[in-house]
Amino acid sequence: MNIKHDKQAILEQGEQILRKQGYHNTGINQILKECKIPKGSFYNFFNSKEEFGLEVLKLYGDNNLAMMAQFLESEEQSPLKRLKNFYEGFFQANQSEGFRYGCLVNNFTSEIGGQNETLRQMLDRQYNRFLEMVINCLQEAQALGEVRTDYPADELGEYVHGHFMGVLNRLKSAKNSRTFDIFYAITFDFLTKK
C-alpha cells in the first residue's frame, strides 16, 4: 500500500505539538505517531528535527502575519484602535486556551533562542516580521496624532511588542488577566501621552 503523505499537514500538526510541548519535549517518534507517518516519510521531507522546527516556525510566522494583518491593516478603524484590538484579540485567543500555549516564536525563543544559532536566526526573522507590522501601525497612528511622536515608531514598537511577549510568558503561570490588564492600561496610556 503506497500512501502519499502531505508535508503541509505534517507541518500543521507539528505546529500544534510544538506549541503545546516545546521543542525539547517533543521527540521525532511522537511526531511520527501523531502525524501517522513512517520515519522514512518524515526524513523524505525534513533532514532533521531542526529543519522540521525551522519549517514549522516559518509556517507559524506566515499564519501569524495573516492574522495580524486582519487587525493591523484594516482601514475600518483608526491605527490606535487597530493596535488595541490586535493585543486584545491575541490575549483573548490565549485566554481561550487557558493561557497554556502562548506564541510559538516566543516559546521557542525562551526555550532555545540562546542554544541553537540556526533556530535563533529564524526566530529573530519571524519576530522582526511581526514587529514590522506593529511599527507600521504605530507610524500611521503617529501621522494622525493618535500616538506620541517624541519616540520613533520603531522604538515604541520594540517597547510595546517586547513587553507583550513577556506578558504572554507571565500569563502561563498567573492564569488570569491581571498581567494583561496592567500591560494594556499602562501601554496605551504611555503611547497616547503627548
Image: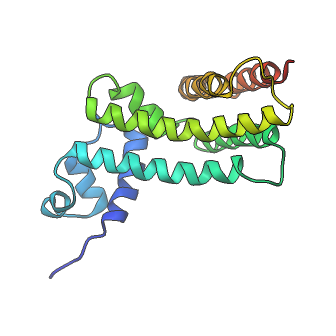
Q: Quadrant of residue 150?
A: top right
The answer, for residue 36, to whether it is visible in the render is yes
The answer, for residue 101, to whether it is visible in the render is no
Q: Quadrant of residue 88?
A: top right
Seen as rendered, the residue at the extreme bottom is 1
Q: Position of residue 82 (x, y in %)?
A: 77, 43
Between 105 and 141, the one lying in front of the other is 141
Please count the marks in the image. 0
From this view, report whether residue 113 is shown above or below residue 129. above
Please name the residue shown 36% across and 38% down the image: 122
From this view, report whether residue 56 is shown above or below residue 5. above
Q: Position of residue 62 (x, y in %)?
A: 48, 52
Please name the residue shown 43% across and 42% down the image: 19
Q: Quadrant of the N terminus?
A: bottom left
Q: Could you tell whether 59 is left or right of 4 in the image?
A: right
Between 126 and 111, the one lying in front of the other is 126
Q: Position of residue 23 (x, y in %)?
A: 31, 37
Q: Quadrant of residue 179?
A: top right
Q: Position of residue 129 (x, y in %)?
A: 51, 41
Please name the residue shown 85% across and 18% down the image: 193
From this view, report whether residue 79 is shown above or below residue 70. above
The type of colouring in the image is rainbow
Q: Quadrant of the C terminus?
A: top right
Please name the residue shown 84% across and 49% down the image: 77
